[in-house]
Structures are given as C-alpha cells and as structure tokens.
Amino acid sequence: MPKVYLAIIHYPVLDKRGDTVATSITNLELHDVARSCMTFGVELCYIVTPLPKQAGIAEKLIEHWASGYGALYNPDRAKALTKIKIVGDIDEMMQEVRAAGNPFVIGTSSRQGSDTLTYEDLRRRILKDDRPFLLLFGTGWGLPPVVTEQCESMLMPIRGRGDYNHLSLRVAIGIILDRILGERGEDHERDDRSA
Amino acid sequence: MPKVYLAIIHYPVLDKRGDTVATSITNLELHDVARSCMTFGVELCYIVTPLPKQAGIAEKLIEHWASGYGALYNPDRAKALTKIKIVGDIDEMMQEVRAAGNPFVIGTSSRQGSDTLTYEDLRRRILKDDRPFLLLFGTGWGLPPVVTEQCESMLMPIRGRGDYNHLSLRVAIGIILDRILGERGEDHERDDRSA
C-alpha cells in the first residue's frame, strides 16, 4: 500500500502582494480535508501553523468531534478527523514523515511552472514506489520559494476549461487526490490497487 | 460548447432517518461551488430552497461579493458568484433550463444503485450531445425518490479507496466536474474541447 501524506501550510505562505505571511485555519478546511483523506486512503494530513492560538483552536475542534459530543452525534466525522495532525513547522513535519522512509516531496501550485509532474506520472509512481509521498499545499497565495525549493517536483496545476483557476484549496485537494488515487470504475489496470 | 448546469437541492432532501427535510445554505458552499463552476465552464448552478429567509441570506451574500465592497476587494470571487442562482423549487428551475433545450437530467448519490452512468460515458455524451446537461446534488442525506424519479440516469458514486464515502458535497461537486469536464494535460483526444 502506498503511503501518501498531505501538508496544508499556513506559514510560510505568500499573500496577494508576494509577502510572506501566516494564514488562519478554517473549521471547514479541517472537516472537508479530513473526509477527503479518509475517502482516498491518505495516511495523514499535517496542518502546519506556528501560531499557538491557531493550533489551540484546531486541537479543540478535533477534540470536540473526535471524542466529545460530536463523536456521538456524527461518528463518520470523528473517524475522519484522526487523519489531521497539527504541527508547528515544516521541519518538525519532515522529521516525522522521514520516520516512514525518505519522502518524495511534491509541491503544488495553481500557476504553471516549467518541468512539472503530470498526474499520470505521479499515479504510476505511487503505485510502484516504496517511498512515502508528501504533497505540500500552500494556503493564501501559495507556497513561497523557500518551500518549493525543498520539493523534488512540482505537480501540474489543475486546469478546467478556460483561464479561470481560483478553485478553493479544499476542492483542489479533493480533485488532486481523486486524480492520483481515485477509482473510476472503468480503469481496469488499476484494479489491483483497491483496498 | 456543451451546456452543463448544476443544482444543489436544499429541499426536498433526506435526513439521517430518511425523513424529507429542508437544509440550510452555507456561505462556503456558495463560494466554493461558484469557483468550481467558473473553473470547469459550468453555465449556472441553481441553489434550490423554498425558504424565503435562506434565499434572502444567499442573495445578500452574492450582492455583497458581486457588486458591494467584496467586488473591489476580490474581483475573482465576484466573477464566480455570477454562476449562482437561487430558485424556490425544482419545477421553477426545470422550466428555466428547458428554455436552453430538453435537458438530460442526472441524479447523484454517494450510494451505489443499479444501472448507473459512468464518468466516461457522461464525458463522451457531453462532448457529442446538443442537449443541455443538468446534474442534481442533494444536501443532507441525499435526494429522495420523488427527485431521483425525475432523473434520466443516476451517476456512479465517487469511489476512493476503501468503503468510507463521506466526502463533503463541495468537494464531491469539484471532483465530479473534474472527471467529466477537466483537462489532464495528457489526454490528447480531448484537446479539441478546451476553450
């Protein structure tokens, strides 16, 4: 079974003007991404924030759903949130992932760069490689060079039809997981991969 | 150019126990779905709610972003929200869509039924058919029989890996649009379809 990890970076990321900032964690981000991770068999999604208050709010939310009243009310949601882990910085996360093997670190962006990894390539690599895969997603206006320089490859941006490419991060993560891990019901070469 | 319409149904839908209820519109639902519609070239997304208060809140939100302060602050968001239209019931919406031609009405569900339409089939039909396509999405615990009976086909559920299939509706809509309309950068047979 391939091991795929995600990281949603809240710092360092770019803002509209290209400055480096820290962004806020949103409640729905955690729920939606947790459910996508469960659905597509992702090992763990790291939420990277150095802000103790932000981390505290996220931990409290996870606690509520995972073992508080929420766990009784909606056990599917509780199960999904076990896929989320809050960490203080990228180094701390990298250290953890390395315990599972030397990760293939992949950056994502909504802007087309040069020499990007296609979804088809990544899907094939995930099938045959023993290394863990770590996909980095930037909130705000995306990952700064200091982060993308740590990536072995950049994944091709999602293209729809036309030039508008302002998908919400929650939705973009779902689409990317579907492209690299989803079953389509007609793709027989990939049947051996289903759980 | 194929014409694809979406409808997010807030009434009538099922609740956890199988009763028919009306659900609430969420702020993020509108933004995320609007951005997905813009990205994948969807004509319009109808939000179906019979509750005047709910419709009022949604209209106010769209107004704020489309022409109020929000339009100056974030014009990409403003543009996306032109893809959203609030309607009072399914009949009203059907009447509107029929003005563009006799629609192929497709229901969606996270539960596997019999005789479902595959993504590959739907993609092909969208390419060659002149009819408008209307995809219905149920909030809550999904579409009741009174709605699915009006559908010509049901779309295959999204399968990830394993049995967990509790994607958020926002994310599921994005994945479905990507599967039937998205470009992958390696799918040459579909190059003629790009805008």
Image (spheres, coloured by chain):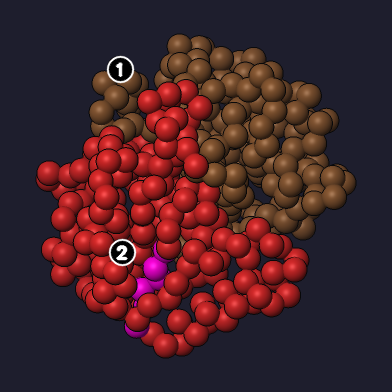
Chain colours: A brown, B red
Per the image, the residue denoted by label 1 is A189
Residue B159 vertical placement versus A187 (above, below): below
Residue A22: image x %, image y %? 80, 50
Q: Which residues are magenta?
A: B45-50
Residue B38 vertical placement versus B186 (above, below): below
Q: Residue at x 34, y 46 (%)?
A: B165
In this rendering, do the residues under marks 2 and 1 share a single chain? no
The amino acid type of the residue labelled 2 equals Ala
Per the image, the residue denoted by label 2 is B100
Q: Residue at x 53, y 49 (%)?
A: B39
- Considering the numbered disc 1 on the image, is that residue within a helix, a strand or a loop? helix
Q: Residue at x 54, y 44 (%)?
A: A162
| Residue B7 is inside the magenta segment | no
Alpha carbon distance from label 2 to label 1: 39 Å
Residue B54 vertical placement versus A168 (above, below): below
Q: Residue at x 25, y 28 (%)?
A: A186
